[in-house]
Amino acid sequence: MMKKKDKRKPPGIFSSGRAPETGTQVEDAEFTRAGKEGKAMYCVRKVTDDLYWVGANEHRLRLFENIHPLDGVGVSYNAYLLMDEQTVLFDTVDWAVCRQFLDNIAHVLDGRPLNYLIINHLEPDHAASIDEVLLRYPECTLISNEKAFMQMRQFGFNIDGRYEEIVEGDTRTFGKHTIAFVYAPMVHWPEAMVSFDVTNGVLFSADGFGSFIALDGVLFADEVDFDRDWIDEARRYLTNIVGKYGPHIQALLKKATPLLPDIKFICPLHGPVRRKDFGYILEKYDKWSRYEPEVNGVLIIYASMYGNTESAAMCLATKLREKGVRDVKVRDVSNTHVSWLISETFKYSHVALMSVTYNLGIYPPIHNYLMDMKALNLQKRTFAVVQNGTWAPKAGDLIREFLDKELKEITVLSDELTINSSMTEDDLQELDGLASGLVDSMKE
Ligand code: FEO
């Protein structure tokens, strides 16, 4: 049995009870766990002086919000613990990872009481463990806003006598650190707010600047190649979860602008912490929330039952490449979850929708994609439409009608193509014209 270290020793840069078994270098692994001798299940990281990441990673969940596939990448639920004269926890985690979270808190507190729990966002992926924290830490007082406390009661938490209500602009001092509260309604729920540590420049940004992908030991965005390995999941997270609320994100960005010179860390509730290159992610958020594309390119989304429309999609992709378009992405609507299609539609300036007709209507997965675009307020894109039908092609007209009537600031190119079952030489000529129309539109 390993000998216990001094319990008052503060946690190190990286601490994991699992590390000794795997051979990872760990300086301060400590074999205690919430009062159970011989156990060490904590896994924490230091963000900056006095502040620790005490969240947890989720790899078992297949569908985030029971709808968006995590596809083996997982997700993190971040929570942060400030060790000032008073101890302050920022948010909790999903119930599924509560045990890890509780062990992390116990390790960092190291016998001290937990004095405050600040709740920035009440969606259960962050708030489900509130009552467990209150139960284990009887001195703990909740700090949040009126709407959050109303929602806590709706979710059945017993918070009577355990909370302090703040309003926007209020501050609380916990020793060295003073925290200011800024409302961020609808980023992502009505009660959402962000907290700013005016002492050390840490912004606790709630869902803002979050991402799918479990951290798995990463803490800072600059420890990974974010633009290569994370940006697609960051976009998929933001556009599918908060895409509908672009104007609210814009409002938050506007509020945050005066704070920018003082922000040293951005600590979101999912994904890595940022301590540099704020301009990179702010620019992405500005574009996504204004529904402006990141890339002048073409996303081809096709629906094909027997491969004929797929063949046309390949021809179009080839023609676009031959005409010099560098950014072309092809997606089979039946094999690509709509969350990816949404994310990529936010990315690309142009979309070619190529669909079979089904029951004299729009192929159901294409219809689902259209409905999701409407729900998420997607706008300001240029579409080209190709339809296929063996005896009564209808999908194209119906897609055009949907785009015209249901989405905002959409251009549908006049070039069109109707395929009867499979491509002919004449169809190829028309497809060439449609590709030229897309290229011309991209130059405008
Ligand atoms: Fe990650 Fe809106 O909760």
Image (tube, rainbow, N blue to C red):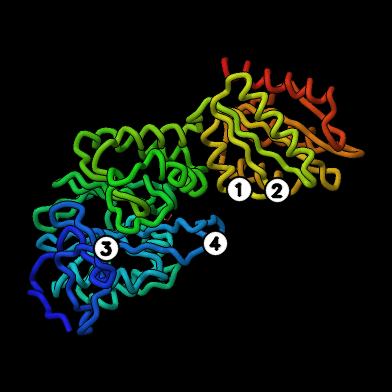
Q: Amino acid at mark 1?
A: Val
Which quadrant holds the N terminus? bottom left
Q: Earlier in the sequence, mark 4 or mark 3?
A: 3
Quick check: 13 left or right of 133? left
Q: Which mark is residue 365?
A: 2
Q: Amino acid at mark 3?
A: Val
Tell me how far mark 1 sits from mark 4, CA to CA: 14 Å
Q: Are marks 1 and 4 in contact (CB under 8 Å)?
A: no
Q: Earlier in the sequence, mark 3 or mark 2?
A: 3
Determine the residue positioned at 60% across, 50% down.
337
Residue 196 placement (x, y as % from top left)? 23, 47
The image quadrant where one finds ligand 1 is bottom left
Determine the residue positioned at 15% across, 51% down.
178
Q: Are marks 1 and 3 in contact (CB under 8 Å)?
A: no
Find disc 1 in the rendering and name its residue.
338
* Secondary structure type for disc 3: loop
Residue 115 placement (x, y as % from top left)? 18, 67
* Secondary structure type for disc 4: loop
Residue 8 placement (x, y as % from top left)? 8, 71
